[in-house]
Amino acid sequence: MRFFSKINTNTKVYGVIGDPIKHSKSPTMLNRAFQEMNINAIYGAFHVEVGMLKEAIEGFKAFKLGGLSVTIPHKVEVMSYLDEIDESAKVIGAVNTVVNDQGKLKGYNTDGIGYVRSLKEETQLDLKGKRILILGAGGAARGVAYALAGENPDHIWIANRTVERALELAESMQLFVKSTGMAISDIAKINQEVDLVINTTSVGMHPQIEYSPIPSLFINENMVFSDLIYNPRKTKLLSLAEEKGCQIHSGLGMFIYQGAYAFEYWTGKPAPIEAMKQAVDYYSK
Ligand code: ATR
């Protein structure tokens, strides 16, 4: 109640745009962060459908909102409507954070750095020299793949249902790391060589929680399994991997850190990570 009583004409407005958006935990997490840091701002969720993104961004500019988080399916298209794009977001080819800098909209990507920070912190893995298999080749895969390339792994395989997207992403990464694209149906050819498997596809996401992007057959105990999905906290893929004795890593940590980096771009202040973790029940299993 105290929080809402502070809203006035100076309150800055932030929000997340996506489709679907109802499931998002971003408002809970970022309102808690603003509150914790005593910043006069609020954060909402905006349901922006495909075909309405340009109008949404124009409205955002007209209303002089403070900043935006961008989620599925707008992370690539939004780049066309911004004034400036950060170098690494350009290389990644996707934007998940927009800053309104006195009327100029600038796009960043905090997914990849958020992911790698969470992975390293929670698994204690040293990624140098590791052989990594990424499932999926969409916007999320791109952010994660480029951030991982900076950790000097030995090889990154990209496996996707649509093989052309996997080949294209692998090709674009050659400058940074040894990388190979393939069809997801072909992973049997390489799965003995892999140390870490990362799911970036939407397979297993609520409400389709009974699906896994790969069958249990391809899981062996010396691999680490990581899933970008945070709803459910433990996906079917992670449950199958855990049953086989693998170390597992869920997407909630990445979600928190991508939001924390966005908060820092918007406010110039360090994000209150602990409060943000509590807001999304990070510590409950
Ligand atoms: P995001 O920005 O979140 O990565 P995206 O660009 O739409 O979203 O990518 C979704 C990823 O999930 C893609 O790799 C997609 O595979 P395709 O490129 O073949 O479409 C993958 N994906 C979605 N549904 C899938 C399914 N049922 N089986 C396998 N892969 C799926």
Image (tube, helix red, strand yellow):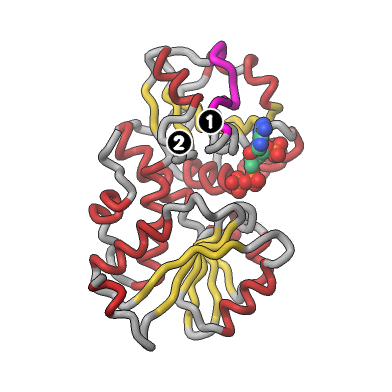
Give the percent coordinates (x, y) of residue 142: 58, 46
Q: Which mark is residue 109?
A: none
Judging from the image, what secondary structure is the residue with disc 1 in? loop
At which x and y percent is residue 127?
A: 40, 33
- First to last magenta residue range: 208-218
Marks 2 and 1, Cα distance to the nearest angstrom? Answer: 7 Å
Q: Are marks 2 and 1 in contact (CB under 8 Å)?
A: yes
What residue lies at 36% left-to-right and 23% top-to-bottom?
A: 247
Front one among 13 and 141: 13
Identify the residue shown where x is 56% and y is 46%.
Answer: 140
Residue at the spot of label 1: 209
Task: Indicate which quadrant contains ligand 1.
Answer: top right
Q: Is residue 44 above or below residue 224?
A: below
Looking at the image, can residue 153 be seen?
yes
Residue 151 position in % (x across, y down) = 43, 41
- Three-letter code for the amino acid on which mark 2 is drawn: Pro
Task: Please name the residue shown 37% across and 58% down the image.
Answer: 28
Q: Quadrant of the C terminus?
A: top left
Residue 218 lies in quadrant: top right
Binning the other alpha carbons within 10 Å of mark 1 as few (below 14), some (14 to 19) or many (20 upward) gives: some
Tell me what residue is drawn at x 47 percent, y 18 percent: 240
Kindly state the secondary structure of the residue where label 2 is placed: loop
- The mark nearer the N terminus, 2 or 1, is 1
Q: Position of residue 228 (x, y in %)?
A: 48, 39
Q: Is residue 197 magenta?
A: no
Quadrant assignment, res 251: top left
**Where's the N terminus, which quadrant?**
bottom left
The residue that mark 2 highlights is 232
Looking at the image, the residue that sits furthest to the front is 1
> What's the magenta bit mostly, secondary-structure-wise?
loop
Looking at the image, residue 167 sits to the left or right of residue 84; the answer is: right
Is 197 placed left or right of 123 in the picture?
right
